Amino acid sequence: MTEHTDPAPPGFRLGWEEWVSLPDLGLPAMKAKVDTGAKTSALHAFDIEPFGPASRPKVRFAVHPIPGREDLSIPCSAAIVDRREVTSSNGDSEWRYVIAAEIVVGGRRWPIDLTLTHRGGMAYRMLLGRQALGEDVIVSPGDSCCQPILSYDVYHSQRVREVAPARVLRIAVLSREPHNYSTARLVAEGEARGHVVEVIDTARCYMLLDALAPDVHYDGARLPRFDAVIPRIGASVTAYGTAVIRQFETIGTYCVNGSEGITASRDKLHAHQILARHRIGMPTTAFAASPKDTGNLISLVGGAPLIVKLLESTQGKGVVLAETTNAASSVISAFRGLKASFLVQRFIKEAAGEDIRCLVVGSKVVAAMKRTGAEGDFRSNLHQGGHAITVKITPQEREIAVRAARAFKLNLAGVDLLRAHDGPRVLEVNSSPGLEGIEKSSGKNIVGLLYDEIEKRVRPLPVPKGRRRR
Ligand code: ADP
């Protein structure tokens, strides 16, 4: 920094990082990042758990005040004053509890609101946002610590060091089928890693809707605080299942797949609109509500042969190939007669009854399989007698599969592609992909890769020795 000749303006000066204390919470020294780009202040906490009566809700949590010293944790509790949706710098949004506490910096003491976040990856234990800065505060972004420096030594004099083992996660698998392959694997793999994994029957969850202390109940009691929820929502319970997930999201639980992405991917029309919005290649698709437009609909997708697909179709049961324009008109009027919603789609003939299932975990395709339909069937669904083998996919296919999963913000997705002459076309994004076929065909521990992703998201990041954060 060069020396300014101007006199320093009056007011309370803060640099881009400052030592602060939060005496109400028993945190006498912490280094905070002063971030005028953020509105709210945040405290990096973990084991965040609401408790107490709904009329006076409280939250308990723990804080590692010294970055890199995960063995020192300070348990805290505070009254909940609000809940707020906060979008972090990486674009992820999260519902957080808001607490009030007094902050002390230099000689000043004033009350601030703090949101509690338990996501890993925050280099500072605390972030001081705009709202917490009074009008006469001058932030000098080029300076570090304009106010007095504190020492972490206070923790050694005041507190007994707790040596905490690697945090065991408490995980819920939301599923109506505790015994199927995918659920059983999710439980077995989680337990093998030392986590506590509970299968919760989606349909038996009930909810308390309340402004400050919403909750999910089960079997006569409030569900405990889960570190993560793995939704396995069947098509028949999409509406209720996504409402339960929404409730978990509201209380700040990390859900592997979010309610919005599941809802959108389940509705073929909505899903195609999202894919189109993200400019992800798919077979040309048309949809109309009025019977007057049948002819136009057929010509929009390039005429026969074409595919007519029920919006609710699963396992290939509502997918029809109409070879001629007459056949297409008859199928469309039959579906209309039944008041069924459907879409009309260009037939990708060259796919020749094969499709590619890409399994996406986080932002990677971890396995892919080629499914081939039964002899003479244009549908490749395994439920229609098809079979699957592992397949090598192209970088273009890999990229489009990841983009499709991201478009729905799904961290576990099965993306189905057709190989068209002019490149891959996304058919569908499945938010509860079956894990048996893909684990068996690839020989990979896909569930293990999913747990790697969950642990990365909800566990505090370990700090390598010698590279401790400031
Ligand atoms: P579902 O959700 O009922 O499984 P899909 O859209 O996945 O319906 O279609 C089932 C199968 O039909 C696909 O796996 C694919 O093999 C075939 N198929 C679907 N749409 C097309 C299309 N436009 N062109 C060629 N084949 C298609």
Image: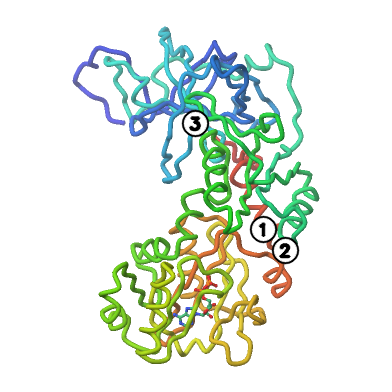
Callout 1 secondary element: helix
Relative image position of residue 43 (x, y in whole percent): 51, 27
Locate residue 42 relative to residue 284 in the image: left or right. Answer: right
Q: Type of residue at label 3? A: Arg
Q: CA distance from mark 3 to mark 1?
A: 27 Å
Callout 2 secondary element: loop
Name the foreground residue: 125 vs 255: 255
Callout 3 secondary element: strand
Asked if the residues shown at circle 1 and circle 2 are in contact, with their CB atoms under 8 angstroms apart, the answer is: yes
Task: Kindly identify which residue carries mark 3.
Answer: 96
Quarter residue 297 falls in: bottom left
Q: Is mark 3 within 8 Å of ligand 1?
A: no
Locate residue 199 relative to residue 301 in the image: left or right. Answer: right
Q: CA distance from mark 2 to mark 3?
A: 33 Å
Q: Which of the marked residues, 2 or 3, is nearer the chain's N terminus?
A: 3
Task: Kindly identify which residue carries mark 2.
Answer: 445
Q: Residue at x 46, y 50 (%)?
A: 260
Task: Kindly identify which residue carries mark 1.
Answer: 449
Q: CA distance from mark 1 to mark 2?
A: 7 Å
**Crowding at label 2, few (<14), some or many (≥20) Cα neighbours within 10 Å?**
some
Q: How is the image coloured?
A: rainbow
Relative image position of residue 370 (x, y in whole percent): 60, 80
Relative image position of residue 342 (x, y in whole percent): 41, 70
